[in-house]
Image (spheres, coloured by chain):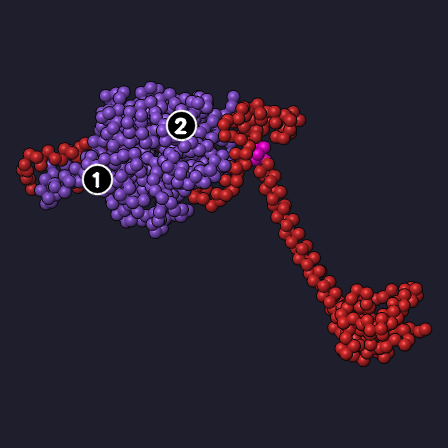
Chain colours: A purple, B red
Amino acid sequence: MRFPTVIFQVTAIGKSVRTLEESVRSVLYWTRHTPYLRFRYLVWVVVEPEGYATDPALYETLRSYGADIWVVPRDYRTPLGTRGKARALQYATEQRLRLGLSRPDVWVYHQDEETCVGQDTLLGISEFVSGGDKLVGAGIILYPIDWSPIPTHVQEFTRSYDDFRVLDSLTMPGNPTAGFHGSHFVVRADVEDSVGWDVAGYSPAEDLTFEIRIRARYGAVFGVLKGFAYEKGAFSMREQLRQRRRWVHGILFAVRRFPGLSRRRRLTIAYSAASWFSALPSVIVLLLSVALHYGPMLYFTSFFTGFIWISMITGYVEGAKLNSAYLGVSPTYFALFWLGLAGALVDVIAPWYALLTRTNVNDFVRKDPVRLPEGARSLGETGEGGWTPSLPRRPVPSVPRPSVHSP
Amino acid sequence: MRRDSPRDPPEGTPPEDPGGQDPDSEGPETDGSVPTRPRPRLVVSEPSLPPEDPLVLDEIDRIISELQTRRENGTSHSSPSPWTMPYSTGATGFPTEDGGGHAGAPSGYFEEHLEAARTAVGRIDEQVGDLETTSASLRQRVAAAESELDRIRSEYYFVRNNGNNGVPSTGNGAPSPPWSEDGLTGSRASAGPEEPGLTSGSFTAIRAASAASEGAVYEGFGVDRYNRTIDSVKAGRARLVILTLGLSALIGIVLLVLVLYSPIVNPPIWVAILPLVWIIPIPYFLLSFRGTQRVLTRNHLNLPEAK
């Protein structure tokens, strides 16, 4: 018997070179500083030519550190002609097949360009790939890197706590609340390569379609991956809005156009989208109800109204608790409230904004901070924009709803 | 020929012969065994001279005569040189055999070398201190290296035994050293063929990369911090459930009271159906709440501490 091999695969456009470098270094650092890992490893960096051209010297440096740099050829075409990140992922799949790495003893750990690993991540992967009977594992992502007290970063707290919901849903038959990650998940190489990433056209949420395919072919083979991954949030509300827009487009793509999706799963995903879309109307109805002095629905929803409010607040508070151990500063409850409110408004608007505007393969959020906000804890690297798609995880539940009748 | 001192000048020798010093400079008095000038300040203690061989004394006399001849021939030296007498005979201030001594300033040559000797001694002292520091540092490094070797050894057996932490025994109770033939063979057998990219050069570079990345933010992402965070979330789980349900009920009651005590209005139908939108996400939130509690309950999310 021999240890399995884990490929740490960073798939990105590759323009945020400093961020990407840090991710690769985190893997190299912790593989060296973590004893008793039950796997051998490779580091793959899969980037687009324009990303490589941003800083070839840095990529060559990464290569000298032992990382394999794969530049997706400009003229590379998948059989179905997919574009965006799915194209690069499919290219990596084909390379594994070519190298004979598409085997049951090889696993692929997927990272976005800003996904740093820790010792816990590696130990979690080690435990998962060496013992379990699950074929795919996903874990919790924190957002402490380059953190600063701004609405977009506070909003990411809710995503961390929401990952518990994602993990539960993912490991349940049918994935009832449609949760999955585009990073911080490990999948057996032969399983990934058997379903591939190729779809017709541009899939804004390639990870969701990938999860749908895996579930359709292999069933409930998803498990909990212990250990956190460490990422960073968008640096502006505008970028947050664009990021969420892409997620919404991904969900809509899966519901409307993705072939092979069962009716049940289609309904599940559609419902998740509907609950997100309901956020903005809920706010409007709340305001109208107050203005019109009309609140009879509260006879039926009163308990759940409070429940939804508390659940939302819990997302921020518990998310902050999860992240706070890794932050240089902890926001006060007062700051948390106002910053969270601003961040939540972006998420409330996002699905409707997505309906009115279009996204494309170049619609990415920069991850190299150009200018860090006050109080940010970072290495202070600067660079220029462009980055890789993140994941369509439903970020914010919904929005405060019911109204009260004024006496 | 009588000499009061082995270094007394021979008869006929001029009193001043500073061994190349400027004749006009202030020189020592040499008119007797009693010093007429203050004794020069010497930091070092004066050594006592052993009995000297008459042949040596004769040789000194010969040299002095030779030097005197040279001086008379106009070959005086303006500065000390290796082949001149270092100081004027009879003016050294060293004790004589009868217990007396000659006072007088030593030549600049003497002071110069004395200073050089002091400097050399000082440097030796510093270097001895440096050696002690270096030695202590080396001891620390050796200890660290030994510790790392222990870890390497442990890791080696871990890999060799496919994940079992037990260190194999050679039969006499002592574990096989990893560098033994047995160990090397086992290593190759268990490691299997090299994967693409996993070369020794790569690992060297990886080590360099690791060393170069000191101080990066991800170095704080250790397993102990992860476990503490998970423990913190788990510890507050029951309280959170109670708090969520309790506050939800409280808010619901307040809202109901407000509705009951508010005036009844009959809005247009399009307004009346609007609150239906509030119901849409309720199942989602319930599932999320249940799921979060379930995943925390069912899964042991902690990880073993890294050794």
Residue B245 occupies quadrant: top left
User: Looking at the image, which residue is at 47% across and 45% down?
Assistant: B215
The amino acid marked with disc number 1 is Ile
Secondary structure under badge 1?
A: helix
Residue behind mark 1: A349
Residue behind mark 2: A92
The amino acid marked with disc number 2 is Ala
Residue B234, magenta (yes or no): no
* Alpha carbon separation for disc pair 2 and 1: 35 Å
User: Looking at the image, which residue is at 14% across and 42% down?
Assistant: A287
| Mark 1 crowd level (few <14, some 14–19, many ≥20, 10 Å Cα) | some
- Mark 2 or 1 closer to N-term? 2
Residue A182 occupies quadrant: top left
- Please name whichever residue, A196 or A320, is drawn nearer the observer in this view of the structure: A196
Image position of A407 with respect to A178: above or below:
below
Residue B73: where, in percent of width, then height? 85, 73
Quarter placement of the C terminus of chain A: top left
Image position of A15 with respect to B130: above or below:
above
